[in-house]
Image (cartoon, helix red, strand yellow):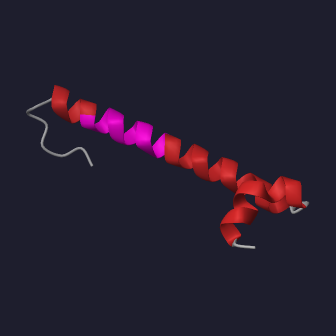
């Protein structure tokens, strides 16, 4: 069984610590994507702003 399977299906296998990795990983990726979209939108809205990152 691969580590990815444990991350995604940890609760059904009885491996409780692994059941939270999939949720944490997907939430982290979602927050990062929202941050990038907001940052790009601010750069587009403020053409004179040179440094945002």
Location of residue 5 with respect to 38 vertically, above or below? below
Q: How many marks?
A: 0
Quadrant position of the N terminus in the picture: bottom right
Q: Is residue 9 magenta?
A: no
Depth order, front residue of 49/15: 15
Residue 5, given in percent of the width and then of the height, sits at 71, 63
The answer to whether residue 51 is left or right of residue 13 is left
Judged from this view, the residue extending furthest toward the right is 14
Residue at the spot 78% in from the left edge and 61% down from the top edge: 18
Outermost residue, left direction? Answer: 48
Left or right: 2 in relation to 27: right
Relative to 19, residue 46 above or below: above
Q: Which residue is painted at 24% across and 44% down in the image?
A: 52
User: What percent of the width, then of the height, locates residue 28?
Assistant: 55, 48
Q: Is residue 14 above or below residue 33?
A: below
What kind of secondary structure does the magenta stretch mostly adopt? helix
Residue 30: image x %, image y %? 51, 41
Image quarter for residue 32?
top left
Span of residues in magenta: 31-40
Q: Residue furthest bottom?
A: 1
């Amino acid at each position: 069984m691969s580590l990815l399977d444990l991350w995604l299906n940890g609760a059904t296998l009885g491996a409780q610590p692994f059941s939270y990795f999939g949720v944490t990983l997907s939430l982290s990726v979602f927050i990062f994507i929202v941050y990038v979209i907001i940052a790009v939108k601010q750069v587009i809205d403020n053409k004179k702003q040179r440094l945002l990152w």
